[in-house]
Image (cartoon, helix red, strand yellow):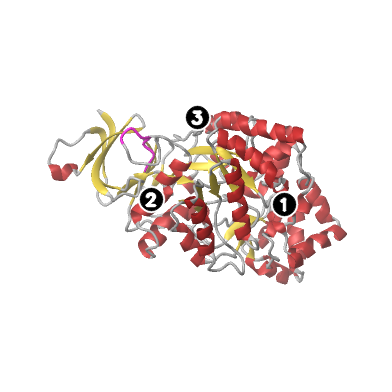
Amino acid sequence: MEDLVIRDADVVDGSGADSYRADVVVDGGRIVSIVKEAAAAGCQRPRAVRELDAEGLVLSPGFIDMHAHSDLALLRDPDHSAKAAQGVTLEVIGQDGLSYAPVDDRTLEEVRLAVTGWNGHGEDVDFDWRSVGEYLDRLDRGVDGRGIAVNAAYLVPQGTVRALAVGWEDRPATPGELDRMRRLVAQGLEQGAVGLSSGLTYPPGMYAGDAELTELCRVVAAYGGYYCPHHRSYGAGALEAYAEMIALAREAGCPLHLAHATLNFRGNGGRAPELLDLLDRALDAGADITLDTYPYTPGCTTLAALLPSWAGEGGPRETLARLADPVTAERVRHDLEVAGSDGCHGVPVEWETIEVSGVTDPALAGHVGRTVRASADLRGETPWETARRLLVEDRLGTTVLQHVGHEENVRAIMRHRTHTGGSDGILRGARPHPRAYGTFPRYLGHYVREAGVLGLEECVAHLTGRPAARLRLPDRGLVREGYRADLVLFDPATVAPGATFDEPRALPAGIPHVLVDGRFVVEDGRRTDVLAGRAVRRTPV
């Protein structure tokens, strides 16, 4: 007798096709049969050790978070309800060109400091890996050798690769260094990574020119992976930055996935049709392009990310030394407030839009929940004095929300034929962006049920089948016989995020059951102790 039958579910299968009513049978971690309209047909109904009545619930594939920052959270937090409770069964990590493999001892310490604001410094994690393959093996073991909460796929981070081969200098790579980067990317893909990410507003990845990136993308293409850039600007020059990535990927013959694709900052409101026209023209000419977005207007990053590229040269410790020097710090201020820093997407910073969401030093907690300008006013300082103090005293670990988005752009882009969902969720800090806990129920509740921006079947396809196709996963992303039983049951009438900007860690409503590999990680709305997630490795070409 099979493990589980889910009875009378409204199946939305991830393909975009119309829903249908069925009994779905799960055994050995896979969907073994789907009996459509079982009750109405009067046929012999399937039986199993356990039966779950799904009357009134939608059964869909598990959601795939195409842009996640759970690189350490999966190892330190066995609960991981931030994603499991949303119905996420697979996260794509190694984003924005900075993560923890491949590294040597020197690079690991530099990267840990550079992304403290994203993931913490990791004092509670045993960094017992150096290669991509070793990191994926570590994910397989997970927490105490029992696995991780949800599955994870990994992108080789181009910035980390450059730090390892070149360092943190703003200069072209030598031929020998470029050869080493090619080998590192190839090794990462051979060991199971699904592609390559870049953070082209973050050092040291931002120091790479297009020729260098193209050569790395040629390697990615040869292994059947994809390139996922956080490109050089989402503000001034955003459309040019998108065009740059499209041209680069086309030259390399590499599939392209645009990370957290949007148009932000003053002057870009209502310009999404220009971006979509650019994408459509490239797609019609044969380009292989997808994108992901989060369904909110504010962005989230670290305060240090706003700094000009030259301030990051040499690594995080050199950045701190520059900020401590009054003359150099004044040059930083001018770039930020007057010229428009490349770290701030070419736009002069507006401190009233920069809200502190988290600090690593508890002594600085009073800044959390306030904009930099509001904190400065309370202290009788200029905004730059407050920002500089935070950067130095928090050792670049401060996270911020950037209130610079445009709702009309968010809605237009999520309708696009290549759109997928990604939370870009930073889980650290006292008041993280609610997208970390609310992205997927917000799509289903607000943008499907309330706003009608997407139809239910269409939206589920954006969150399941379409990302699985980008990842080239042959047995995930659809409700099909023989596919992995990574499944979500949700109530379309009540599904909604609990997370808000005031209560960013509140869990969603209307998602009573989530299965990973056929095992309940959420049951009757509560997180179980099941750790069924593993590393999902690239499918060989």
- Of mark 2 and mark 3, the one earlier in the sequence is 2
User: Which mark is drawn over residue 460?
Assistant: 2
Residue 119 visible to the viewer: no
Q: Which residues are magenta?
A: 481-487
User: Among all residues in the image, which is located at the extreme front?
Assistant: 285
Q: Residue at x 83, y 51 (%)?
A: 321
**Marks 2 and 3, Cα distance to the nearest angstrom?**
27 Å
Callout 2 amino acid: Val
- Give the labeled residue for mark 3: 540
Query: Which mark is in front, 3 or 1?
Result: 3
Residue 426: % across, % down: 58, 50
**Marks 3 and 1, Cα distance to the nearest angstrom?**
39 Å
Residue 292: % across, % down: 51, 51
- Of mark 3 and mark 1, the one earlier in the sequence is 1
Q: Nearer the viewer, residue 308 or 325?
A: 308
Q: Is residue 534 in the magenta section? A: no
- Of mark 2 and mark 1, the one earlier in the sequence is 1
User: Which mark is drawn over residue 15?
Assistant: none
